[in-house]
Amino acid sequence: MAAVPLLSPRWLPDGPDDVARAYFEALAERDADKALAFLDPASRKPPDPPMLTDRILNDPGYTPPDEVVAEVLFSATDTSTVKVDYRINQGNGQLELTLTRNDDSTEWKIQNGLLSMALPRNDAGWETFLVSGAAVPATQERLELVFPGAYRIVATGNGIQEAPPITVWAGAGETDRLLVRLRPTVREAIEPQVRAYLDTCAESRELLPPRCPFGGRSDWPVTSLNWTITHYPTLKLQLTSTGAEAWVVGEAGEAEVTGRTSSPLTPDFAYRTTFAVFGFGRVVDGKTVFVPNH
């Protein structure tokens, strides 16, 4: 049985397999109203968000089925079963459509031409999924009514992390996990803030600067204290388990403090120390900020 080109000359659907092919042709033409006309109205209650629109079908993130082959498996006066094989990109799909009509003088209508589709697990603090451009709350687990085809899903609404888009087929019971990664802009924002934090600590005239990662020791009181950061720590950033924040760890920092003591033997004071810095990167009022944990 040869595949029927989707862009073949128009015909008036007659048999149930003709109706099935015409339905998929309408999807290939990205014409939602035409596609909906082949469905039983009772099977297409308005979904929320509205997925059954030309805007969705014409979005670059939607891929309609191609190379459609329709075969009647069973047919009686008022009901028929049609097997539909198709391809999307390099994958194969198959549906068994149920079509009904009142009698042989009325048109066949597809009962199950719309599919549900699972959305990615929201285990990383996303706000919204863009499903072929349509905004869906990330708390929603699935879409109940979508046209057959493949949909690109983009996770949004998290200033700390990002994930490459994934493609999900209509009818999928589950989806691939989003490959979450730290946004490059987070490091760009955090590194100068860590330096500024350490520079502020170095402005202290105390031997143990408060809420700072380094300090000195002396057996004698020290005056004329002066701190210098001789080596800024190398930062490592890692997403927390919720994805809402990033751990910030800086290792192998070095600082030196100098001053004067009342010791007659060592009046010139100098002390070198290594230190590590700890904290979080989080979004506050739309900006990525470093919050030290000292």
Image: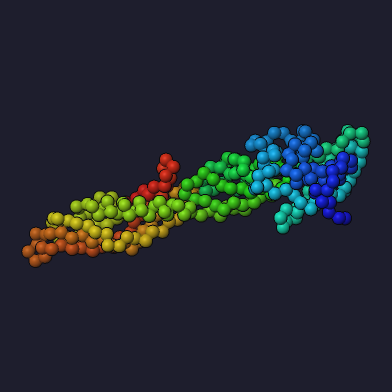
Relative horizontal placement of residue 10, taking residue 238 as reference (left or right) = right
Residue at 82 percent of width and 46 percent of height = 21
Q: Is residue 245 visible?
A: yes
Q: Is residue 241 visible?
A: no
User: Among all residues in the image, which is located at the extreme left?
Assistant: 264
Residue at 51 percent of width and 54 percent of height = 181
Colour pattern of the rendering? rainbow
> Where 162 falls versus 37 (above or below)?
below
- Return the x and y of residue 151 as percentages of the image width and height: 66, 47
> Where 234 falls versus 28 (above or below)?
below
User: Among all residues in the image, which is located at the extreme front?
Assistant: 9
Residue 15, picture quadrant: top right
Relative horizontal placement of residue 107, taking residue 158 as reference (left or right) = right
- Return the x and y of residue 178 as percentages of the image width and height: 57, 52
Near-viewer residue (189 or 198): 189
Residue at 82 percent of width and 43 percent of height = 22
Residue 16, picture quadrant: top right
Residue at 70 percent of width and 39 percent of height = 54
Q: How many marks?
A: 0
- Return the x and y of residue 5 as percentages of the image width and height: 82, 51
Looking at the figure, which quarter contains the N terminus? bottom right
- Return the x and y of residue 242 as percentages of the image width and height: 49, 49
Relative horizontal placement of residue 28, taking residue 292 as reference (left or right) = right
